[in-house]
Amino acid sequence: MASGTPESKSKLFTSSAGPLPLWAGAAILVSAAGAILVLGLLAVSVMERRWEAQRPTMVATPIAQWEPDNAVWGQSYPRQYESYLKTRITDTRTKFGGADPRDYLEEDSFQVILFAGYGFSKEYLQARGHYYAVQDVRETARIATPFQAATCWTCKSTDVPRMMDKMGVKEFYAANFHDLTSEITHPIGCQDCHDPNTLRLRITRPALREAFAAMGRSIDEASHQEMRSLVCTQCHAEYYFKTDESAGLKNYLTFPWPKGTTADDMLAYYDAIDFADYVHPISGARIVKAQHPDYELYRTGVHSFRDVSCADCHMPYRTEGGVKFTDHHVQSPLLNIANSCAVCHRWSEDELRGRVEGIQTKVSEAMLQAEEALVHAHFDIAAAVQAGTADDDLRAARALVRGAQFRWDYVSATNGMGFHSPQESMRLLGEAANLAQQARVDAARLLARHGVTSAPRYPDVSTRQKAWDVAQSFVGGAGVKLLP
């Protein structure tokens, strides 16, 4: 039979069970059309979501080069701004961190002795969220003096780059902190890390750029992934205030990186220039206060080795609809395990939290052991002084205490209780305890020369108030009697 005849066409609507009903053809056509419509709508939705995720954010209003107001940025970047506002939350607390302003001196009275004669013995609170940076630095007891270097504003406000541009960098650092309180009002935020025209990450603080140059590197060559840590490094790094009259520098913020970024490298740098933040009133040791070398410690850990950035853990990506963006609620990853840790580590949240806290607990225990050895070393040296030991004879013991305390503080002052690099943290704390014990042995030998063969009478420093009273007695010059 020829194709296309009425007979052949009728077979199209005939099954083995007999001919199909007359309405079946229409039903098939309607179903096919419906399926095509659904698939078309799905394709359009997918394309819209992709376009929404990839398209540049429409800037509602132009943003000035040094715009400090985060709310202005929020008009163009509402998702990021809304998440940033969550840094106002202050009731989050992990075992060793969170945004709760816990009092370190109440929890650990040894630190009152270790920072005797320095501002950190007056007040030392865990930092709250970025939203409170300006308020907290204004209210801290550590800067309640007629003159305080304006350098202390550097990492607290988006107004700082504008003021540096207006005054000059050297002039800004040399100014009085209290003279700028009316100019500096906006907390840490958008402008600190982003270019207002492109939103690209950028470095706004000169110290980090200068530190890279001192190491023979250009920070402009850093990759985007590196920048997701380096914008944090502008503030979360070790630094000191450099004064050089010949160069016209006063309280100039400087990273001690010319010899390298490890604790040993930086202490070697400080030793070479004979720098000290203060002279300890109990032992007479020249102490360097570690500031919060988070970046340097992170550099020695496995996350850095695997190119995991600070933002990957503390500002993980979020998705709303088809929009993927960085969560600007900067916080401990333990408060957002699903979006931070669990992206790479496929275990339950309880397992991940237990693993982290287990590591942190071991570091904390080692830290307290180093503190106890250090506190006794300071008193042992003071006892040797009371016995009549000359300064020249105490030089070695004081140098050992200096090295021990910097290594301990290098771990203590960082966020994360050593988790950014557990092996390096334990190494440094072990060295700190060892050096402190060596200093105690030296002091014991010096005491023996003066006929003192029993241990000093260590004062009770078991509470913050008791430790403060003991420390202040040495600050005032009298001290407490340590010789038996």
Image (spheres, rainbow, N blue to C red):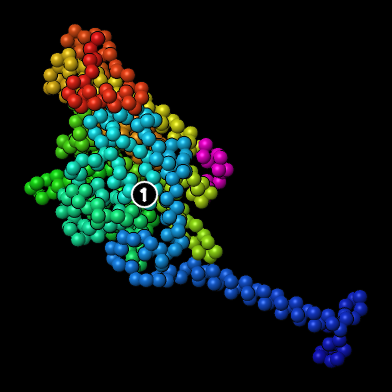
Residue 317 or residue 466, whichever sits in front: 466
Which residues are the magenta region?
A: 341-354
Give the image quarter of residue 444: top left
Tell me residue 253's x, y (percent).
Answer: 21, 48
**Left or right side of 37 for 481:** left
Q: Amino acid at mark 1?
A: Tyr
Where 461 sits versus 229, above or below?
Answer: above
Residue 476 or residue 335, whichever sits in front: 476
Category of crowding for the residue at label 1, using alpha-carbon neighbours closer than 10 angstroms: few (below 14), some (14–19), many (at least 20): some
Total numbered labels: 1
Which residue is labeled 1 in the image? 132
Tell me residue 43's x, y (percent).
Answer: 60, 73
Taking the magenta stretch, the answer to whether it contains residue 54 is no
Residue at the image point whose x is 41% and y is 66% from the top? 75
Residue 304 or residue 112, whichever sits in front: 112
Q: Quadrant of the N terminus?
A: bottom right
Q: Is residue 400 visible?
A: no
